[in-house]
Image: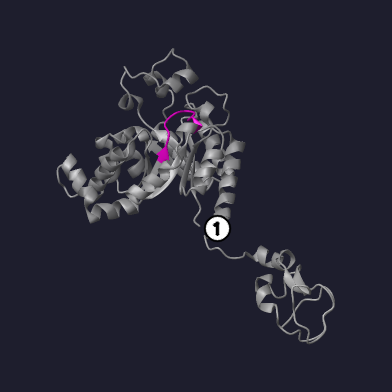
Amino acid sequence: MNDTFIIAEAGVNHNGSLDMALELIDAAAEAGANAVKFQTFKAEKLVSRYASKAEYQTRNTGTAESQMEMIKKLELDEEQHMILLEHCRNRCIEFMSTPFDSDSVDFLANVINVSRLKIPSGEITNGLILLKFAQTGKSLILSTGMSTLDEVETALGVLAFGFINSGEKPSMGAFTEAYSSNKGQTFLREKVSLLHCTTEYPAPFDEVNLKAMDTLKEKFALSVGYSDHTMGIAVPIAAVARGAVIIEKHFTLDRNLPGPDHKASLEPGELKQMVSSIRQIELALGNGIKQPTASEIRNMVVARKSLVATRDIKKGELFAENNIAAKRPGNGIPPIYYWDVLGKVAPHDYSIDEMVEL
């Protein structure tokens, strides 16, 4: 099978420090991730002065500052992005970032020229930026946290409309028409992957609902992955076993660092263990064909049985229940033919435990 695309989500766990961001790239590369992802935004374009922090953000950073003040300290400027991009190239790991405003979409698509863009869950009802994402023509990963199937379908309609780029005025009717069209569906299959996700940090295990990946795949016929916010590495590994083709997981240099996301993130050693475990699961999934493996073929003769004489048998004597039975090794007549052998004439003399031949 193809390798799962593993995104090591650095997010804002650099705490606004370029040196720390560079260290995060090193850690992601050493862990074996396919990509390391940051977040690109201008605080004043992302939140209003009146936006409150999420409960988990307050829990992790305290209440003394507003959301605006918190994220303003976590911005990376354009020059820092270019430095991170170059460092990713040197470390042979893909640079990714999630843009949270239109200018950031333009910067990542046209200046950085990323291979793909991630659309965060919080933007799934933001038609303005969804259209902007699609008009870049880039491959897109749409995170579906907090959303219903109808909301995902509507968002995909906006993306299909943007990919088609017919010049028609945007509207809900136009989005629906684009989504339903052959051209729109072709663009979606070629350009869009979905991520199932639970938007809570950390996410409770009983709210993960990995089976929703199956629902998304069945409903939209698109590639589906999983963005994980649980503690530990068990759930993303299970997601790969259930068919996730993309895994995204937050990581940090140290869970005890101050900041909104560190406590729900993996440390470098755990990230490396997750990547290694996913690669093992990929091998273990196999090709789905039920047949003996190379190792099993070598073990067949030892583990299986053959028909053998249970006492001395003379040539011409009939094979019967009182003179043959099944014993190891398994390189003779399989016992499945026991009833067919009964009553046959022994072609030569047999000693006890000698394999029966016809």
Q: Residue 338 or 31: which is nearer the viewer? A: 338
Question: Residue 40 in magenta?
Answer: no
Residue placed under numbered mark 1 in the picture: 286
Q: Which residues are magenta?
A: 196-205
Q: Position of residue 231 (x, y in %)?
A: 54, 32
Q: Is residue 350 left or right of residue 4?
A: right
**In the rendered picture of this protein, how many numbered marks are placed on residues?**
1
Look at the image and tell me whether residue 112 can be seen. Answer: no
Q: Which quarter shows the C terminus? A: bottom right
Visual colour scheme = one colour
Q: Residue 56 or 130: which is nearer the viewer? A: 56
Q: Residues within 10 Å of mark 1 (few under 14, many from 20)?
A: few
Q: Position of residue 176 (x, y in %)?
A: 20, 45
Q: Position of residue 48 (x, y in %)?
A: 30, 21
Q: Most prominent secondary structure in the magenta stretch?
A: loop
Q: Is residue 195 left or right of residue 347?
A: left
Question: Residue 199 in magenta?
Answer: yes
Q: Quadrant of residue 53?
A: top left
Tell me if residue 312 comes above or below residue 137 in the rendering. Answer: below
Which residue appears farthest toward the left when viewing the image? 169
Q: Position of residue 219 (x, y in %)?
A: 33, 48
Look at the image and tell me whether residue 237 can be seen. Answer: yes
Residue at the image point whose x is 76% and y is 84% from the top = 346
Q: Is residue 189 left or right of residue 298?
A: left
Tell me if residue 285 comes above or below residue 141 in the rendering. Answer: below
Q: Quick one: SS at disc 1?
A: loop
Q: Which amino acid lies under the numbered mark 1 shown in the image of this protein? A: Gly
Q: Residue 210 or 184: which is nearer the viewer? A: 210
Tell me if residue 41 comes above or below residue 67 in the rendering. Answer: below
